[in-house]
Amino acid sequence: MFLLFRDLAGYGKTRNRGGFAHGGIVQHDGRAARALEPGCLAAESASVTRRFAAGIAAAAVLLSLQACASSKSYMGIPLVKGQTNPELRQLAMRARTGDKQAQLELGIRFEEGRGVGRDIEKAQDMYRLAASDSGGPTWVFVPSTVKGQRGKVVPVDRGPMLRGLEEARWRLKGLEEMDDGR
């Protein structure tokens, strides 16, 4: 196991269980630690990059599995056929895909308790989604995987720009004022 970091002067410095080495990496094989020469850093850097990429891939798989597990319901409404009212299921599916009007309608249902249990927090969540603008371009920083190169800021298109609904803003404001009055 090794840790690589930069000191204030920008020189490579490593630490391994209390030991430091300048200009190289300290490797620990379970019995002894030895410092590698700077020329050996390329092989170590490639190994670190591969392990980093493998870690990112594993994280992506875990996140996708979590998304698969949660796709059976939305806001507590079952999305599997036969487990709930078909109209409510369709509304929840539309709201999940970003349909602002469906998000507003689902928020109203949660606020009034129509077809679902009355839940003001879920109503507020749905109103926030319906009231917020979505889509359009955004900028994302992508770090470099090559040592010595800078990362990049790249544009990402999130689909067509959709304006939030004024009625959702109005209803959200009303619920927040009720909370403040309590």
Image (tube, rainbow, N blue to C red):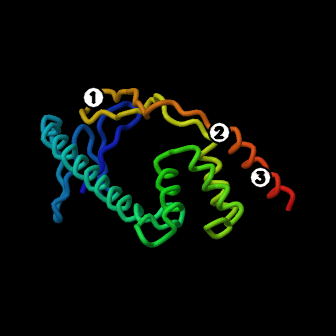
Q: Which mark is residue 165?
A: 2
Instruction: State the quadrant of the N terminus.
Output: bottom left
Residue 99 against residue 141 in the figure, above or below: below
Counting from the top left corner in percent of width and height, residue 159 is at 43, 33
Q: Earlier in the sequence, mark 2 or mark 1?
A: 1
Residue 117 against residue 49 in the figure, above or below: below
Pointer 1 with pointer 3, Cβ within 8 A: no
Q: Amino acid at mark 1?
A: Gly
**Few, some or many C-alpha atoms within 10 Å of disc 3 (few <14, some 14-19, many ≥20)?**
few
Secondary structure of residue under mark 2:
loop
Left or right of 175 on screen, residue 13: left
**Few, some or many C-alpha atoms within 10 Å of disc 2 (few <14, some 14-19, many ≥20)?**
some
Left or right of 152 on screen, residue 33: left
Instruction: State the quadrant of the C terminus.
Output: bottom right
Instruction: Give the Cα separation between the discs numbered 2 and 3.
Output: 17 Å
Instruction: Give the Cα separation between the discs numbered 2 and 1.
Output: 46 Å
Counting from the top left corner in percent of width and height, residue 24 is at 22, 41
Q: Earlier in the sequence, mark 1 or mark 3?
A: 1
Counting from the top left corner in percent of width and height, residue 112 is at 71, 62
For the residues carrying marks 1 and 3, which lies nearer the camera in this image?
Answer: 3
Counting from the top left corner in percent of width and height, residue 85 is at 51, 67
For the residues carrying marks 2 and 3, which lies nearer the camera in this image?
Answer: 2
What residue is disc 1 on?
Answer: 148
What residue is disc 3 on?
Answer: 176
Secondary structure of residue under mark 3:
helix
Q: Write down the quadrant of residue 101 in the picture.
A: top right
For the residues carrying marks 2 and 1, which lies nearer the camera in this image?
Answer: 2
User: Which residue is nearer to you in this view: 160 or 145?
Assistant: 160
Q: Earlier in the sequence, mark 2 or mark 3?
A: 2
**Few, some or many C-alpha atoms within 10 Å of disc 1 (few <14, some 14-19, many ≥20)?**
few
Instruction: Give the Cα separation between the discs numbered 1 and 3.
Output: 49 Å
